[in-house]
Amino acid sequence: MTETLRVAVIGAGRMGADHIQRLNKRIHGAEVAAVVDVDLARAQAAIEGIPGAVALADAEEALNNGDVNAVLIATPGFLHEDILFKALAKDIPILCEKPLTPDAESSWKVVEAEVALGHQRIQVGFMRRFDAEYAALGGIIRTGELGELLMLHHQHRNPTTPDGFTNEMLINDSVVHEFDAIRYFTGEEITSVQVRLGKTTRNAPAGQHDPQHVLIETESGVLADVEIFVNAKFGYEVATQASFEEGVVNIGGDKGPYTRSAGHWGGNVTPGFEERFGAAYDVEIQSWVDAALKGEIGGPTAWDGYATAACCEAGVEAQKNGEKVAVKLAAKPDLYK
């Protein structure tokens, strides 16, 4: 069995650069062998100080590099499908940042390709599952110590959005995390999505309706809702409240010490996702590496990527028509049961 993952990181943007430093400095059992970016200068800057790593402008060249035995995909989602097929053909461990692909149809093709391979190689980067508070809430749900889980209330607030962040991206780039979290907490598939558009902030750019209220139902009837507010200005805040038969549990929200001094009180709100989920990313990547060295995966599967893509499609449709939209899923292959 492989003793060290020699990873090709595809994409050296904000997320890719963060993972490159993570692999180089904090992860055991893995090394950065190559960095690929269409901007070769950016790839070269990303490997500075990493012995033996090469900068390339083509993903296929990295996959054909005999020194590479694993791949981490951190490109924009529309580029994932082609890289995934090529990496599956090499039968090497894959960590693919969300989304698996941008739509359910192409995600299903990736699932079919992995099923044909006969074993799981793809882990999808839903990092919240590796957050300590998410794991603690998941444990409370699974032990049943507070009775049955009845409802989930989620808040997902960003300080602002980059140029070009469309209305659909509120679902595809943001609420996608809540879709996966709801599936993780309940252990069930989501059956329907509805989106309500109320009063919008003056800080939303043209063409974007912000905030939105997303209503979700699972197979057993667990109800969940999401306040998605991507121009909230005050910081990055992700929080969940879970209502049980015998109690209520809150996770997320403000971080750091809560201080009372000089006639004031309060704490801090993280400025971005790197600060809020930095530790979770570390745990996620270490879990992937540890599992990959044993020929396994250590987190969300390609099926999870496909299922959330189907939820996103239902969510975008619900944005447009205001109706309750059913989530359409193919039968789950035995490989993921």
Image (spheres, helix red, strand yellow):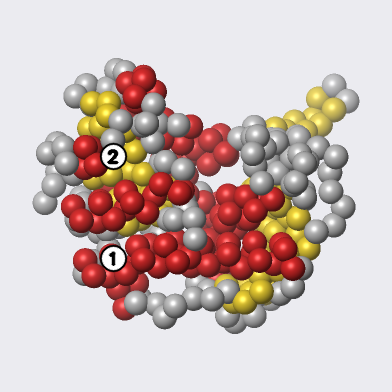
Mark 2–mark 1 Cα distance, whole angstroms, equals 19 Å
- Local packing at callout 1 (Cα closer than 10 Å; few below 14, some 14-19, many 20+) is some
Give the side of residue 1 with respect to residue 266, left or right.
Answer: left
**Amino acid on which disc 1 is placed:** Ala
Residue highlighted by disc 1: 113
Q: Position of residue 254 (x, y in %)?
A: 69, 41
Place residue 69 in its image quadrant: top left
Report the number of numbered marks.
2
Q: Earlier in the sequence, mark 2 or mark 1?
A: 2
Q: Position of residue 170 (x, y in %)?
A: 66, 51
Give the side of residue 275 with respect to residue 164, left or right.
Answer: left
In the rendered image, the vertical position of residue 144 relative to residue 164, given as above or below: below
Q: In front here: 69 or 132?
A: 69
Residue found at x 69% / y 67%: 318
Residue highlighted by disc 2: 59
The answer to whether any part of residue 144 appears in the image is: no
In the rendered image, the vertical position of residue 185 relative to residue 49, given as above or below: below
